[in-house]
Amino acid sequence: MRSETEMMNLILDYARNDERIRAATIEGSRMNKNAPQDQFQDYDVSYIVNDIESFKKDDAWLDYFGPRLIMQKPEAMALFPPELGNRFSYLMLYDDENRIDLTLVPITDLPEHFNETDSLTKVVLDKDGICPKLEPPSDKDYLVKKPSAEFVDDCCNEFWWLSSYVTKGLCRNEILYAIKYLDLMRNQMFNMISWKVGIETNFSVSVGKANKYLQKYVSEELWQNILKTYSNDTSENVWRAMIISCNIFMDATDFVCKKLNYSIPVYSVNMLKYIKKYAELESVEREE
């Protein structure tokens, strides 16, 4: 596997030697000193170019970076609608297992590109002095942020509203439907847990994309209970997973609301009674 130094040199050398490329930025976890460093980290690269169509005509230029195991071009796929406007991206996994996520940015879209960049962006090449001056890369944009009372209430409302869909699906023996909405409930559960973590750490940490760092900041008991919410191979286990999710959510809500002096929504108790009415478990009482 090529080293980080080799890969960075490769990325920069290509940009320096191609006159169509006027600037380059590196983004993502490679710029985050707090992120775990391992062989699975991507190289998130943006090339600001003055002739994007010439790159898109032929993929042969990408061979410079090595033989590829697979490549995806999201903006050229029929299955998914493009999301980057005039920009064009290449997601590439190479045969030495390095991965480059490379985005071409038309020079006319330069202001938009920098308006959308986050605090983990670093300008690594600027041939014409066209890039704005950025602060040193940090993960400040990814730290858990203190929620407003409205955010907390909306989170609660969404969590408990979704629970009615899970209940309905299970009662109809539509397990895939129930699992889908349990997944959406879990998203709100993670929001509430992350706010709890934020309070406990004075909002100084990030739980990472898809909550990948969350385990570092919660108790072992809570972590094991979170894992139990993923048991969904039978209707009974989906019921149990939902109830565990409800217990976790209510505990986290109590903590967040008390610490931030917010009101705890009354409908949580109503919805727990509703779920209990239909649950196929002996007891779905909230664990004290």
Image: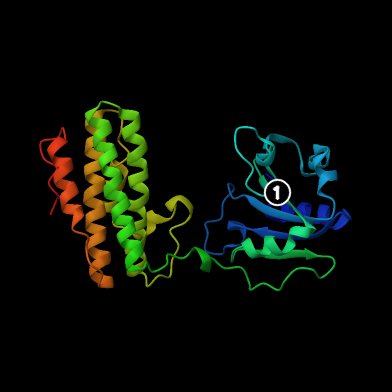
Where does the image place residue 95, in percent across and percent down from the top left? 69, 36
Where does the image place residue 183, in percent across and percent down from the top left? 36, 41
Q: Residue at left 25%, top 29%?
A: 235
Where does the image place residue 101, in percent across and percent down from the top left? 66, 47
Q: Which secondary structure, mark 1?
A: strand
Q: In terms of depth relative to the viewer, which is nearer, 178 or 284?
A: 178
Image quadrant where residue 251 sits = bottom left
For disc 1, the marked residue is: 102
Which residue type carries mark 1? Leu
Q: Residue at left 14%, top 41%?
A: 276
Q: In terms of depth relative to the viewer, which is nearer, 87 or 200?
A: 87
Task: Say if 190 sits above or below 59 in the image.
Answer: below
Q: Residue at left 42%, top 53%?
A: 211
Q: Residue at left 32%, top 63%?
A: 196
Quarter of the rendering occupied by the C terminus: bottom left
Quarter of the rendering occupied by the N terminus: top right
Where does the image place residue 102, in percent across and percent down from the top left? 70, 49
Task: Say if 170 sits above or below 21 in the image.
Answer: above
Q: Residue furthest top?
A: 173
Q: In terms of depth relative to the viewer, which is nearer, 32 or 251?
A: 251
Q: In terms of depth relative to the viewer, which is nearer, 262 or 142?
A: 262
Q: Residues within 10 Å of mark 1 (few under 14, many from 20)?
A: many
Left or right: 19 with respect to 37? right
